[in-house]
Amino acid sequence: MTIRRLAIIGLGLLGGSIGLAVKARGLAIATTGWDRDPAVRQRAAERGLADTIADTPEAAAQGADLVILCVPVGAMADAARAISPGLAPHAIVSDVGSSKAAVAEALAAALPGATVIPAHPVAGTEQSGPDAGFATLFAGRWCIITPPEGADPAAIEALSTFWTQLGSKVETMDPAHHDLVLAVTSHIPHLIAYTIVGTASDLEDVTQSEVIKYSAGGFRDFTRIAASDPVMWRDVFLSNKGAVLEMLGRFTEDLTAMQRAIRSADGDALFDLFTRTRAIRRAVIEQGQDDGRPDFGREHGA
Ligand code: NAP
C-alpha cells in the first residue's frame, strides 16, 4: 500500500510541519489541509503548508490514502466524525496526539469499521499555530506507532514508511505503555514546569521583576516548557490521567526523599542522585536527542 494522497486535519505546529516536510523532501504525495479557523486556512495557503486547502474536513479527506488528525487530543473524536463522510474505504486514519490509549478508543468509536492506526511523533516545540511549523521538525526524532490489536500489517507498514520518509525513526508500542513512558518523559516534566513557573509568579516576597531578572539561574529553561500551548496540555493531562497520576505519585515520593535528605543534611543522598542524573544527560546527548554544547549552545558575553 502506497500513500499518494494525504489529508492533514489541523494546520498548527504538527499539521503544518507534516505538510512542509512532505514538500521539502520531494515525496510523491499530494497534500490537502483543513483547519477549523478560516484565518488559519488562509495563512496555511500563504505558507504552502499543503498543496491545496479544503473548505471542509469532509472535502479534505476525500480520496486520501492517509488522513492525519493534528488537533488537540480532546478534539480528536469530533475531527474523526467530521472527516467520516469523505473517507475512502481503503483510507488509513492516524493522528499525532500526545496520549494514545484514550485517543485510540475515541477514534475507534468515532470511525467504526475504518482502518485506524494512532501515532505520536515525539517532536515539538513550545510554539503553536500555522506559523510555527517547519520542515525539519521530525528529522532524527522518534515516531511511536500504537496499532490496535489485529490491525492490518500493510497499513502499519505504510504508516511506518510515511514517517520514515519524513526523517523519523519509528517504533511500535502498546498504547498503555506509550502513555506510561510519555508520562515520565514529557507529561510530568511539563507539569513540573507549569507548577514551578506558577509558584514563582505567586510569590509575595520575591517580585515578578526579580524572577525575570535572575531567570538565567535555571528558571528560564522551565519557562520555555511552561509556554507550551494551554489547550493542548490541558487535554494531554485529562486524557492521560491514569499514567500521569501514577508517575506523579512516584515523583512525589522521590521529592519527599529529597526534602528529607536536605533537612537531615544527608549530602551523600543528594550527591548520589545528582551523579546519576548527570549520566542520564550524557546518554541523551550521546543518543543524539539534544545539543551537547554547554547551556544548549546559547551565546554568552559581549
Ligand atoms: P497547534 O499548533 O495549536 O495546532 C492545533 C490545531 O488544531 C489548530 O489549528 C487548532 O485550531 C486546531 N483545533 C483546536 N481545537 C480544535 C477543535 N476542537 N476542532 C478542530 N480543530 C481544533 O497544536 P500542535 O502543537 O500542532 O498540536 C496538535 C496535536 O499534536 C495535539 O494532539 C498534540 O498533543 C500533538 N503533539 C504536539 C506536540 C508539540 O510539541 N506541540 C508534539 C507532539 C504531538 P485553533 O487555532 O482554531 O484552535
Image: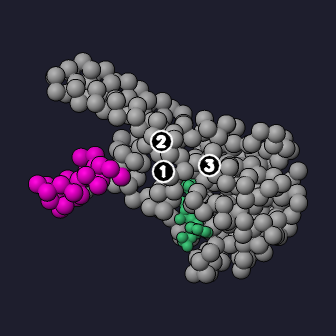
The one nearer the camera, 78 or 41, is 78
**Numbered badge on residue 237:** 1
Residue 125 locus on image (x, y percent): 49, 56
The kind of residue on which mark 2 rests is: Val
In the picture provided, is 83 more to the left or to the right than 169? right
| Image quarter of residue 24 | bottom right
Determine if the magenta segment contains residue 217: yes
Q: Residues within 10 Å of mark 1 (few under 14, many from 20)?
A: many
Q: Residues within 10 Å of mark 2 (few under 14, many from 20)?
A: many
Task: State which image quarter holds ligand 1.
Answer: bottom right
Residue 258 locus on image (x, y percent): 27, 28
Nearer-N-terminus badge (2/1): 1
| Image quarter of residue 21 | bottom right
In the picture provided, is 128 more to the left or to the right than 196? right
Instruction: Please report the bounds of the magenta region as a residue range.
Output: 194-219
Q: Residue at x 36, y 41 (%)?
A: 294
Q: Does the magenta stretch mainly form a helix, a strand or a loop?
A: helix
| Image quarter of residue 208 | bottom left
Q: The C terminus lies in which quarter of the figure?
A: bottom left
The one nearer the camera, 77 or 174, is 77
Residue 68 locus on image (x, y percent): 71, 59
Q: Do the residues under discs 2 and 1 have CB atoms within 8 angstroms? A: yes
**Numbered badge on residue 102:** 3
User: Residue beneath label 2, please?
Assistant: 244
The kind of residue on which mark 3 rests is: Ala
The one nearer the camera, 23 or 240, is 240
